[in-house]
Amino acid sequence: MEKANYKIAVVPGDGIGPEVVREGLKVLEVACKAEGVDYETATFDIGGERYLRTGETLHDSVLEELKQFDAIYFGAIGHPDVMPGVLERGILLKLRFALDLFVNLRPVKLYPGVECPLKDKTPDDIDFVVIRENTEDVYALEGAAFQPNTENEVAIQPAIYTRRGTERIIRYAFELASKRALERGKPAKVTLVDKANVMTVGHGLWRRVFEELAKEFPEVETEALYVDAAAMEFVLHPERFQVVVTTNLFGDILTDLGAAIQGGIGIAPSGNIHPGKVSMFEPVHGSAPSIAGKGLACPLAAILTAALMMEHLGEAKVAQRIENAVAKALQTGKIRSLEAGKMGMSTQEVGDLVASLV
C-alpha cells in the first residue's frame, strides 16, 4: 500500500507565528514518521511584512496556488504598523470566503495538569466542541456610515443569514455529534446558541432549521440556549455541552470564553474547514508582536492545531499521537504555565519536550 502524500501549505505569518509554527512542524514530522505518513510542505510569505513591502495582502494568483493544497497550516496575522482590519479582511476573511471555509471548529478541552480558572472543574467536565458558522453574519458585509464624525453620525452594520449557510453548518454539527458519540460510547447532544427571542428574523431562521434537522437525527439530544444563558453555562456548568453550534458573531465571542476555561489561548487550536476541500488550521492566540522573537510564546496551540489538521486529513493515529504527547508534556510539571513568558521553558524547549514524547 502506498503512503499518503499530503501537500501542506505553511503560512507562518506575523509576530510569534513563525516561532510556534516551527514547533508545530517539528512535532508533526516526528508523529508522521512514526505512523509512516508522508507529506510535503511549501511556505508562503503572506502577512504584515509582505504588505508593508509590496502593498499586497493576498494576491489572487497566490490564492489559486493555495487551492491546490490539501491543507493550510497558518501561524498568525497582525502587525503593529498595519491599520487594524487590513490584514484581517485582506487575508483571513478573504481566505474564508474564497475557499468557502464555512466551519470554524474550536475544541474546548481541559487537559490534566492544566490549571482551570473554574472552581472544582476537572478534565471530565470540560471536553466539548464549538462549531461556529464562518462565512455569514456581520462579517460578510462591510456596513456603512452616514455623516461620519458629526453629531448626526449614523452607523449601519448589517448581518446576513441564508438558509443554505444555516442548514449546512447545523447539519455538520449533528453529524459531528453522532460521530463523537460513536467514538466515545456516549449519547450524542447538540446545543444551538442564538438570540431568537430578540433577533427574531435572522435567528428565527436558525431556530427553525435546527428544529427541522433534529428530526433527521432522532438519536441526538438537542437543546437551544440564548447566548447570554450559554455564556453563563460555559462558566457554571461546562459539563452540559458536547457539540455547540452557533452564529459567526456569537461563536467568535464564545470560543474565546471556551479557550479561557480550558486554560487559556496558549492551548486553543482551531480549524477553518470545508469538508472534502482545502481547509485552514490556525492557533487562535494571534500574533502577539510584543513578545515576537523572544521565545516566550506557548506553542501548544500550534502543535494541537497540527493534530487537528491531520485528523481532518483522515490521519487519526497521527493526530492522537500529537495530542497524547501534549497531554504527557503537561503532566510532567515542566511547563509551569500556559501564559507567555511564564512557562518556565522557551518556545523551542516546549516543542522539544512534546516531540520527545510523541
Image: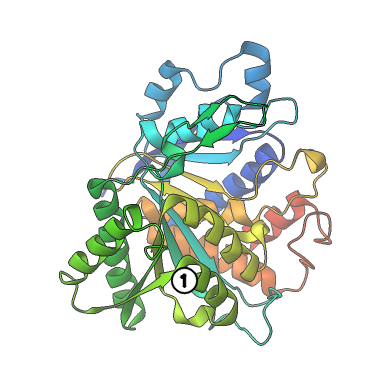
Residue 196: x, y in percent? Answer: 37, 63
In the rendered image of this protein, does residue 242 appear above or below residue 47? Answer: below
Q: To which quarter of the image does residue 112 belong?
A: bottom right
- Of residues 322 and 92, which is closer to you in this image? 92
Residue 63 in view here: yes
Residue 169: x, y in percent? Answer: 31, 54
In the rendered image of this protein, does residue 101 appear above or below residue 205? Answer: above
Residue 172 in view here: no
Q: Please state which amino acid type lies under the numbered disc 1.
A: Phe
Residue at the far left: name it: 216
Task: Give the side of residue 128 with respect to residue 235, left or right.
Answer: left
- Of residues 106 and 358, which is closer to you in this image? 106
Residue 301: x, y in percent? Answer: 61, 55
Q: Is the C terminus in the top left, top right, bottom left or bottom right quadrant?
A: bottom right
- What residue appears at the point 41 percent right and 72 percent down from the top-left corner? 225
Q: Few, some or many C-alpha atoms within 10 Å of disc 1 (few <14, some 14-19, many ≥20)? A: many
| Residue highlighted by disc 1 | 128
Residue at the far bottom: name it: 120
Residue 239: x, y in percent? Answer: 50, 82
Callout 1: helix, strand or loop? strand
Task: Give the side of residue 309 with respect to residue 51, left or right.
Answer: left
- What residue appears at the point 31 percent right and 83 percent down from the top-left corner? 187
- What residue appears at the point 60 percent right and 73 percent down from the top-left corner? 111
Q: To which quarter of the image does residue 83 belong?
A: top right
- Of residues 10 and 353, which is closer to you in this image? 10
